Image: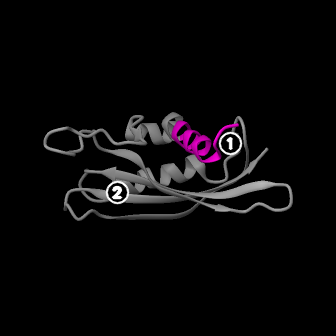
Amino acid sequence: MANPSSEVQTLLYTTLRDDLGVAALVSGRVYDRVPRASYPAGAITAAYPYISFGPHDVIDDGADCIESGEHTFQLDCWSRAVGQVECKNIVDAVKVALHERELTLANNALVEIRVFMRRVFADPDGLTAHGIVMVTVIVEEP
């Protein structure tokens, strides 16, 4: 049986990577672990713009003999284009790719997927626009 958290993350990753609207903006650059250089230590080597996975949490929501959970994923969108428009476009494309879509998992049952929050702001580095997309996925385990 596949771990629901891992299976949902894989689904989000492949959906975003393969979505034409998202791909047109980030060229398939969706990362679980953003590429970094060994020197200078930790410098990001990924080309902009890109999407990365942020924090993830699960609230168990089982009842009687049904195991289920509400998974919340933070997807981070990064852009170095002038202004915030490119980042806003990426955030909106992520919503279109995921919100209330009829997606399926191989080993667990995807009950619902919703984008419930989007935010774009200037990163403290002064160069980067940072977008956050919060996604909840309700999953029932067999």
Q: Position of residue 35 (x, y in %)?
A: 30, 38
- In which quadrant will I find the N terminus? top right
Q: Quadrant of residue 109?
A: top right
Q: Which residue is most to the right?
A: 64
Nearer to the camera, 16 or 8: 8
Classify 10 Å Cα crowding around label 2: few (below 14), some (14-19), many (20 and above).
few
Q: Position of residue 98 (x, y in %)?
A: 59, 49
Q: Position of residue 121 (x, y in %)?
A: 33, 65
Instruction: Give the residue at mark 2.
Output: 85
Which amino acid type corresponds to the residue marked 1 in the rendered image?
Answer: Leu
Classify 10 Å Cα crowding around label 1: few (below 14), some (14-19), many (20 and above).
some
Q: Position of residue 139 (x, y in %)?
A: 71, 51
The stretch in magenta equals 1-15
Nearer to the camera, 28 or 63: 63
Dot 2 falls on a residue whose secondary structure is helix
**Residue located 66% across and 38% down the image:** 2
Residue 110: say if magenta: no
Is the C-beta separation of discs 1 and 2 under 8 Å?
no
In 3D space, how far apart are the residues under numbered discs 1 and 2 (Cα atoms)? 28 Å
Q: Quadrant of residue 129?
A: bottom left
Q: Indicate left or right for 36 with 61 as reference.
A: left
Which amino acid type corresponds to the residue marked 2 in the rendered image?
Answer: Val
Q: Quadrant of residue 67?
A: bottom right
Q: Indicate left or right for 131 with 7 as reference.
A: left
Mark toward the viewer: 1 or 2: 1
**Residue located 32% across and 45% down the image:** 49
Q: Which mark is residue 103?
A: 1
Q: Indicate left or right for 81 with 102 as reference.
A: left
Q: Which residue is most to the left?
A: 40
